Image (tube, helix red, strand yellow):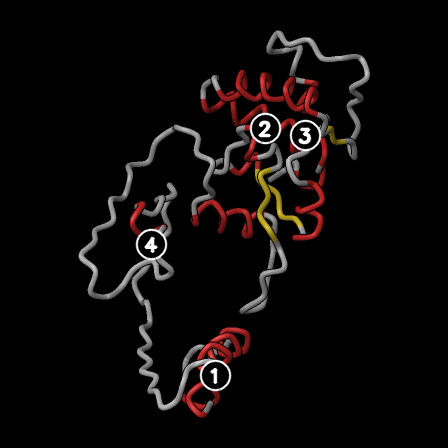
Amino acid sequence: MNYSLNETNVKSDLYWLTKIKHFSKQKEPFKVHILEYRVTDTELLDNAIPLEKKFLEQTVWYRIDDDYEFTVPEKNNFLTKHIPTKVRQEVYHRFKINLKKGDFAVDIDHFVPLKHGGPGNIIENLIPIGPSINRRKSDSIPSKLYDLGLKHGIKVPSHIKIEHDRFYSSKKEKGIAQKIINKINDQSLVEIRTDYKIIRDFHFPSLSDS
């Protein structure tokens, strides 16, 4: 308790409450040894680096005594589902999101859903959104996506209405959307960015200059 209140550099009450609850379940007598490391030299990458399989199967990602080496991929023009840290920071910067330390009230959402192939490494498919709205939106399809069906030679049912606040979520509607997304993602990167920007700007005109 004394360490968490007076000595640590970690100021998150939630973090320490979780730790204290965990320690309180231990059988006495026991000792707790705490080491804190401050990261001072960091680099934001254009690409996401997936964790190796062995680290996905343990509660601690990396241990100080582990023999590991990051392989930083070269910058490329391929789409990825992950949102790289550098792109996430760009979203916050462009949309002027200012959060206090420890405040995580804003999600970065794949506007055309990740589940259906919406990319995470281009800003044209990313929007800042509240967590509760993000959960309600889930993997529903923004209506403007269907407007690109004609461009890509895909017939869209007449009941689909292209409206700012309309999304579609039936199995059939998602199936059609998947075909359009595949066509979009098969273009050059410039064309891909253009199509996703058209979709995002239609539903969020306030972001159209970003």
Among numbered discs 4 and 1, the one appearing first in the sequence:
1
In the image, which is nearer the foreground, mark 4 or mark 3? 3
Q: Estimate the x, y position of residue 103 in percent, counting from the top left.
A: 58, 65
What residue is rendered at 70% in x and 30% in y? 142
Alpha carbon of mark 4 to alpha carbon of mark 1: how far? 37 Å
Tell me which label, 4 or 2, sits earlier in the chain.
Answer: 4
| Disc 1 target residue | 24
Q: Residues within 10 Å of mark 1 (few under 14, many from 20)?
A: few
Residue underneath mark 2: 196
Among the two numbered marks 1 and 2 on one chain, the one whose residue lies closer to the N terminus: 1
**Of 185 and 179, which appears nearest the observer?**
179
Q: Nearer the viewer, mark 4 or mark 1?
A: 1
194 relative position to 142: left or right = left
Q: Which residue is mark 3?
A: 141
Q: Is residue 124 above or below residue 132?
A: above
Nearest to N terminus: mark 4 or mark 3: 4
Residue 101 figure quarter: bottom right
The amino acid sitting under disc 2 is Tyr
Farthest residue, direction front: 27
- The Cα atoms of the two marked residues, 4 and 3, are separated by 34 Å
The reply to whether the C-beta atoms of the residues labelled 4 and 2 are less than 8 Å apart is: no
Q: Image point 28% across, 36% down: which residue?
A: 74
Amino acid beneath label 1: Ser
Real-space Cα separation, disc 2 to disc 3, in angstroms: 13 Å
Q: Amino acid at mark 4?
A: Glu
At numbered mark 3, what does the secondary structure look like: helix, strand or loop?
Answer: strand
Residue annotated with mark 4 = 43
Q: Give the spatial CA distance, label 3 vs label 1.
A: 46 Å
Residue at position x 58%, y 61% in the image: 104
Instruction: State if disc 2 and disc 1 touch (CB < 8 Å).
Output: no
